[in-house]
Amino acid sequence: MSETVRGVIARRTGAPVELVDVVIPDPGPHDVVVRVQSCGVCHTDLHYREGGINDEFPFLLGHEAAGVVETVGESVTHVSIGDFVILNWRAICGECRACRRGRPWYCIDTSNASKSMTLIDGTELTPALGIGAFADKTLVHERQCTKVDPAADPAVAGLLGCGVMAGIGAAMHTGNVSRGDSVAVIGCGGVGDAAIAGARLAGAATIIAVDRDPRKLAWARQFGATHEIDASAEDVVERIQELTGGFGADVVIDAVGRPETWKQAFYGRDLAGTVVLVGVPTPEMTLELPLIELFSRGGALKSSWYGDCLPERDFPMLIDLYHQGRLPLEHFVTERISLDEVEKAFDAMHHGDVLRSVVVW
Ligand SMILES: NC(=O)c1ccc[n+]([C@@H]2O[C@H](COP(=O)([O-])OP(=O)(O)OC[C@H]3O[C@@H](n4cnc5c(N)ncnc54)[C@H](O)[C@@H]3O)[C@@H](O)[C@H]2O)c1
Ligand SMILES: [Zn+2]
Ligand SMILES: [Zn+2]
């Protein structure tokens, strides 16, 4: 039987979000209904609201979520009613070319719910990243649910569902940071600070935080930054070189995603170093570089989609590290808010006042 819950939607480009009634259909054979307990406010939700991802309005926003499985479709085997889960947007298929080649983190056919959630009048909603969790309950595919230790605080655990995983994975998986490396992270929001935490977990010796907001630089320390660069006042490339014995960093992670920050990452690396782009550029941004610079500096220029994570491998492991005191995930939660405060949280994000505002139930 379908049911009606409250959910936060973006109806058209740039318009403030609205709290409305959302109809959750009966789960299809492999779908589950999750009672949402927490959902972080990610920059990507704002990108959706601004029409920067696609124009399939109205969107049901929210995607960094944890909750409890409440109802399961008839063929569900992956999770059971009552499981505490983190929602993911990489429910790998096992069948596509990427999966068959043993690179499932590039899966191009990840699974989502088989039915649409709708407004009362039947208008179909597009759930952000196939999740849509700024809602009391949401409908997802069973493999979008990753079971983790239920002792974890939902507000903390849910953040692994997107930005924090993207950042940690940008360092550990995409950037392949290893013991003794020097790493610089440009943009120390939730994603950048997670990249700092990931670099520390991987054993980086020098971790340079770069931001133009001094408050962000202070927070970056809590995650493992060993040095800070104020991008509003200092020459980022020069300072990275100074802090790395004149060489540049082994890995530079751009967690902003603008041409100017990407160029800083490109020139801030050591020869044959790695650039990881994890911040998401907008479609109109372009880049111009002398091709000879790409040739002569060598190395790897990579993008990180969701930190190249595998939710079933990474989420339970990172929750364990968190419980052991080796990953300070709790510091990402700046404030806990209610479902009707998402628009306010976008403002706070815009002003740089928070790492993450998390809606809790
Ligand atoms: N690749 C992925 O899978 C993935 C997943 C989640 C989020 N993201 C993207 O990552 C990016 C960061 O997300 P977030 O939630 O951390 O955002 P955020 O807004 O919280 O953080 C961005 C930070 O960058 C800083 N900044 C902005 N311009 C800068 C500049 N020119 N130089 C230095 N610092 C600058 C800001 O002060 C802020 O601290 C967004 O583009 C988001 O869409 C990517
Ligand atoms: Zn696949
Ligand atoms: Zn996100």
Image (cartoon, rainbow, N blue to C red):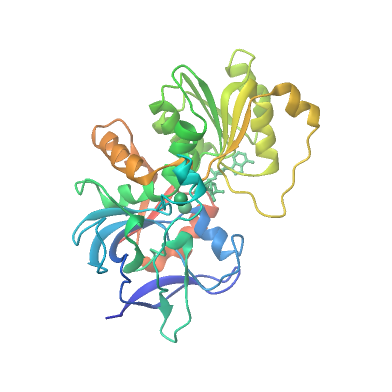
Q: Is residue 334 above or below residue 340?
A: above
Q: Position of residue 265 (x, y in %)?
A: 64, 32
Q: Is residue 67 above or below residue 236?
A: below
Quarter of the rendering containing residue 212:
top right
In what quadrant does ligand 1 lie? top right
Nearest the viewer among 238 and 95 is 95
Q: Is residue 206 left or right of residue 266?
A: left
Residue 190 makes an appearance in the image: no
Q: Quadrant of the N terminus?
A: bottom left
Q: Quadrant of the C terminus?
A: bottom left
- Of residues 71 and 156, which is closer to you in this image? 71
Q: Is residue 358 left or right of residue 17?
A: left
Q: For residue 199, what is the image quadrant?
A: top left
Instruction: Answer with the quarter of the image where residue 54 lies.
Output: bottom right
What residue appears at the point 32 percent right and 60 percent down from the top-left corner?
142
At x 75%, y 25%, the residue is 295
Furthest-top residue in this view:
245
Residue 327 pos. (x, y %): 33, 34
Q: Residue at x 62, y 20 (%)?
A: 248
Instruction: Specify the farthest residue to the bottom.
Output: 121
Q: So how many labels did they put on this image?
A: 0
- Residue 186: give x, y in percent of width and height: 57, 35
Residue 2 in percent (x, y) is at 30, 80
Along the line of sight, the residue nearer the viewer: 223 or 294: 294
Q: Residue at x 50, y 43 (%)?
A: 189
Q: Nearer the viewer, residue 113 or 268?
A: 113
From this viewpoint, is residue 164 visible?
Answer: yes
